[in-house]
Each structure stands twice: as structure tokens, then as C-alpha cells.
Image (cartoon, rainbow, N blue to C red):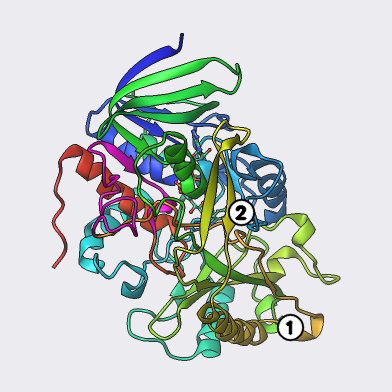
Amino acid sequence: MAQQFRADVAVAGSGAGASAVAGELAAAGMDVLVVEAGPKWFDRLGTHVRNVYSSEADLSRVGDIIYGEMLGYPSGSSEPVGNLAELKVAHGAGGMFALWMGNCPYPDAGELPDWMGPADWKPYFDRALGLMHVDQNGGGSGRMFEALLDKTKRAVGPRPAGREVRPMPFAARRVDGTLKITASDDLFFRGGDQPPNLRIITDCIVQEVIAGAHRATGLRGVRRTAPGDQIEILADTIVVAGGTVGSPKILAASKLDAGPALGRYIHEHVCIGSRVTLNADIRELIRDDEPVYSIWVPFSDGRPWQNQLCRFTLSSDGTRLAPGIREVDTSDIFTFVAMDVTPDNRFIFDAERLDPFGLPDAAAAFGFTRGDRERIGAAMTEHFLIASEVGDMQAGWTPSIYPAGGSTHFMGSCRMGETDDGESVVDRYGKLWRYDNIFVADNSVLGTSNAGNPTFTTVAQSLRTADRILGRNRPAAD
Ligand SMILES: Cc1cc2nc3c(=O)[nH]c(=O)nc-3n(C[C@H](O)[C@H](O)[C@H](O)COP(=O)(O)OP(=O)(O)OC[C@H]3O[C@@H](n4cnc5c(N)ncnc54)[C@H](O)[C@@H]3O)c2cc1C
């Protein structure tokens, strides 16, 4: 006999999309129950790992925790999903949102669906900016930061109005002098304590949405700490927010009529990454307590990629420093290249073979188009121009293209669309086309080619989902 719960809304997952929806619904007075497959991790549920290990000078220490302990293959599997060698996720309270870097680029019109343009998004982006505490100054300040910004501008040349090189909007604030990166705790609890109408169960895997022909009545899950111990949550509305791999698995396991697009249109940002030792003239401006920073070269018309200079949480394995060079003397450079979004790039679910979560096992078909390869080539040129403008090439320099999935920005699989034409799984509100009360809220709904880190867009979209559940209408901007 399963243990039973009752809520207005049941949410599967506790990451970026889940916490945005659940926090908004709870703030409006709804009774919300969240079920997270992984452990609680930290005492303040959903807080960021860097709020616990807070050194800004020793980021590789946090990198070791992130890559060694928190990220893993989906569903705790010992093997990657098909040829997606580096597609990893974080199963724990807050999901990957508990590890992210806080970069929040504002999408260009060319990165949004052509059937739902910037005016439709603006009210939700505005709300996300506030809830996520987005600092427009990229965290950085001071002479070193200014020098790096100037050199980056020189390297890439002029950009269209509104898409100039600038500090990256950064979802973090200083609390008592310590950097507090926005994570699920902020969106769930809005700076206060956990309210009684927002319950969160950890270590419990959602295995099924219980549904009839057009309506769901609840979620079914199993506790990881006591296998065989089932729970059932009866709810008026269901939000599936298990991420790009987790959500389609839950829908596939539930045998819902999600249409032919389920699992298809998966995409990411092809990630070109390198670390440079900064030129001596920049190094001499670095302070001992130099704060972390992030510089942004936005996606723009004709340049469908984004560059970013920052100090990243690489693990110490990936950190090769020249003699006498400290971590603060280096900069990481990432170029995220937009991919073509095609139905041929897809997960293939096998209902007969179950993964360690008891969900359908996934394989994948994933590759580059000719257009992707041309774009990657052009973007690499710009990556090199930046690296050689700010960095010491004589010290050696090794750029790499990350293995598939390694961007940590995997999207698609429950694609959002304008009509139920077989090319999408959910409507503009994240609602499954063929059901009245089942929603998806996470990176999986982002099905338009883009190059900007996706979490800001996912949070904005999840706030739209919350408004739809609440019956609230936020008019499009003029
Ligand atoms: C090191 C790192 C740096 C990053 N930096 C940035 C950045 O600077 N900017 C940016 O935009 N993005 C960044 N990202 C990506 C960002 O973390 C993701 O875009 C974001 O967290 C995705 O949100 P989501 O809701 O789709 O999934 P997640 O936040 O991963 O949440 C999904 C949750 O669902 C749970 N779940 C899955 N299946 C089930 C199930 N069956 N039952 C119950 N629960 C389940 C998972 O355990 C997880 O907690 C970074 C990621 C990493 C790892």
C-alpha cells in the first residue's frame, strides 16, 4: 500500500524550472508538493554549493566537488546516454541549479521562437531578473576587469546596438561580504523560511504521472532510501520538471499521449573552451582578493554564438597552470555555438529496459549538420582572436571542443510549439498538448536554436507556466 499525499500541485524535480514554478504557486497560496529524486545535500534545501564552499580564489576545490561528487550520468547510471559522452546531470536538491555559474545572458530575438517573440517574453524576463537577483555588472569590478573588458572589445570589433560586449548579467549578490549565487532556495522560499504550503520530499524518484485520457490525477514515486516503499500524490495539477533527460523519461514511463516529438529536437551549445594565462600587463592589475567576474560577447545577427570570459569552477584535473601562475592569473574562455535543431537528434526510449531509477532506458542519436560545422569553425576563429588578445600564447594554449553533452546546457526533448503539429510536445505555457493539467517546466521545453546559457530563459518560461496554472494573465510588453 503506497503512502498517500494530497496537494493542489505536485512537482517532479527541484531544479531551476521546478523551483521557479513551485515558489510562484506557493507564494500565491497554493498547496505545493515537490518530489526530488536526489538527496537534500545542504542544510538550506536547494542552496548553491558555492554558498557552502565559498572561496573565490580556490574555485578548483569546488570544481572537484562538482565534477567528483555532484554531477553524474542521468538516473545514476554507470554509463552515458548513447553517444552523448558528457551528458551529466545533478540528482540532488536544486539539481544542476545548485552548481551553475549564475550567468544570465538576455536572449537575442534570434534565439527565441519566431512565433513567440521578445514582447511575449519581456514580462517574464523582467520578473526573473528580480527573483534571480541578477546583477548587470557581471560580478567584476576594478582595473583588471576593465582592462579585460577593453581587450575583449578590441578582439571582436564592433557589435550591433544592444548586443555590445559587456559584463555578463550574473545571478548573485553579496550577503555579509560573501557571494550568494541564486539557486532553488531563493526561488522556493523567496528569502524567507520554508512555508508550510510548500512541502519537499527528497530521495524519492517519480516514476509515473497517473493519468486518464486527458487529465492527470497524481504522481507515483518510490523512495530511494527504502526501495519498494511507494508514495502517491493526488493533485489537481502536475508539473514535470526533471530536466531535459528526466522529464521525457517520466512522460515515456507514464505512456502518455505526448506525440511524436517526445525525446526529439535535443540540442545544446557546442562548447569550445580554453584557459589562458593572462598577459603580464593584465596580471599586474590583479588584486589578491580579485572577485570572480564574467564578460559577455552576446549572440548577434550573423554571429550565432556567444563568448564568455570568466573564472570557472574547473576541477583540479582540468587545471594546468604554468610555473609561478596562480588561478587568479588565468581566465577561462567559453564559446557556445548554436546548433541546428532537428528531429533527427533524439533520445530513443526503451520501455523494456529500465534504468537505475526504474524509468525507460535511453539511447541517443546525435550529430552535427554541415551548418553546425561551418558555424563551429567561424566561432573558433573568434575564440582564438580573444584568447590571443588577452592571453600569453607563448605559454602554450589548448582549446578543446567539449564532448557531446558537456556544455551542461542540454535542451529540447519536450519542445514547446505554436500548434500541435507533431513538432512539439507542449504549448506556449508548457502544457502537454493533449492533456488539461500536465505541464513541463525545465530546459527540455527550449526547442529553438540558441547560444546563450539557458537557465534565465527556463526560469522566465516556468514563471509563464505558473501564471497559466494560477489563471493569471501577464500582458505582452509593447
Ligand atoms: C557547473 C555548471 C555550470 C553551469 N553554469 C550555468 C550558467 O552560468 N548559466 C546557465 O544558464 N546555466 C548554467 N548551467 C546549467 C544550469 O544548471 C541548467 O540550465 C539548469 O539547472 C537546468 O534546469 P532544469 O530545471 O532543466 O534542470 P535541473 O536544474 O537539473 O533540475 C532537474 C531536477 O529534476 C530531478 N529529477 C530528475 N528526474 C527525476 C525523477 N524521476 N523524480 C524526481 N526528480 C527527478 C533531478 O534530480 C534534478 O534535481 C550550469 C550547469 C553546471 C553543471
Instruction: For marks 2 and 1, give the one nearer the viewer.
Output: 2
Look at the picture and state if 210 lies above or below 405: above
Tell which residue pokes out farthest to the right in this image.
323
Q: Main secondary structure of the magenta part?
A: loop
Residue where numbered disc 1 is placed:
392
Query: Tag 2: residue type?
Result: Leu
Point 49% across, 64% down: residue: 344
SS at circle 1: loop
Q: Is residue 420 magenta?
A: yes
Query: Tag 1: residue type?
Result: Asp
Residue 131 point in image, percent of width and height: 33, 48
Residue 467 point in image, percent of width and height: 21, 44
Which quarter of the rendered picture does the C terminus lie within?
bottom left
Residue 301 point in image, percent of width and height: 38, 83
Look at the picture and state if 413 lies above or below 290: above
Q: Is residue 251 left or right of residue 38?
A: left
Q: CA distance from mark 2 to mark 1?
A: 32 Å
Residue 123 visible to the viewer: yes
Residue 221 point in image, percent of width and height: 47, 24
Q: Find the magenta span and give its range.
A: 419-446
Point 61% across, 46% down: residue: 54
Residue where numbered disc 2 is placed:
87
